[in-house]
Image (cartoon, grey):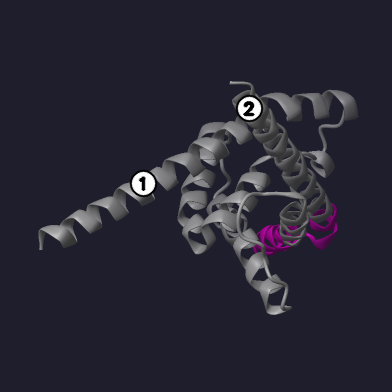
Amino acid sequence: MNELIKQVREKLLSELEVLLIVVVTYLIAFAIVQFGISKIQTAILDDNSSYFYASLIFLPHGVRLLAAFLLGARSIFPLFVASLAGQWLFFNPEPYAFWALLPGCVSCYLAIRLIALTGIQFIEGPINLVTWRQLMLIGFLGAVLNGLGIMVVYLMNGASELSVLPRLFVYILGDTVGALVLLVGFLIVRRFMKASQNRV
């Protein structure tokens, strides 16, 4: 009985650690977008219309991608908590915003499952050039699924098709570029850390 309690406690602590890592990482990426990238984007484009209201470099999608790749289905709940926290901290959510969060939480995991159905084998282990290409494929398909899911929520809440279509392309572009930028940053940081360790 004591062994079972110990195992349950270790499992809960492990899941709590995963939750904290995903949420904190997601919120940091979200803050960089909200207070950095979006400000620069607005200044460059000089456009406050809804066409470009979404970030063209949405870094949190890279967090979704890495979480889904490394954790599988275990990533869904932490990503949902992170998305809720991001909406609560950085926005005044619309009544239907809760439903619009759901596609992003599952999009990259669903992309992995769909790609696996084609017979493509994912390479386990450290992220290298080969897995990087696979990750970008997952990230792009995840961006498409996320964009389509959000658009369905918008349409069900009375948005017109003409207003939704441009947003769909902006979501897909922003998520894909955001995942690319975050992955490149991750690889650069990892290489720098390896170089630092080799010098010691």
User: Which residue of the protein is positioned furthest toward the right in this rendering?
Assistant: 45
Q: Residue under label 2, please give it.
A: 198
Tell me which corner region of the image, top left, top right, bottom left or bottom right, holds residue 90: top right
Q: Residue under label 1, please give it.
A: 16
Where 148 sits versus 90, above or below? below
Q: Position of residue 166 (x, y in %)?
A: 85, 52
First to last magenta residue range: 142-166
Picture quarter with the N terminus:
bottom left
Picture quarter with the C terminus:
top right
Asked if residue 34 shows in the view, the reply is: no
Per the rendering, the mark at residue 77 is: none
Q: Name the residue at 58% across, 61% down.
A: 106
**Prevailing secondary structure of the magenta residues:** helix
Residue 102 lies left or right of residue 142; in this view the side is: left
The residue nearer to you, when weighing 189 against 89, is 189
Amino acid identity at mark 2: Asn
The answer to whether residue 20 is magenta is: no
The residue nearer to you, when weighing 118 against 24, is 118
Q: Give the structural element (helix, strand or loop) at label 2.
A: helix
Amino acid identity at mark 1: Leu
Tag 2 and tag 1, C-beta contact below 8 Å: no
Asked if residue 174 shows in the view, the reply is: yes
Where 2 sits versus 112, above or below? above
Q: Name the residue at 74% across, 30% down.
A: 38
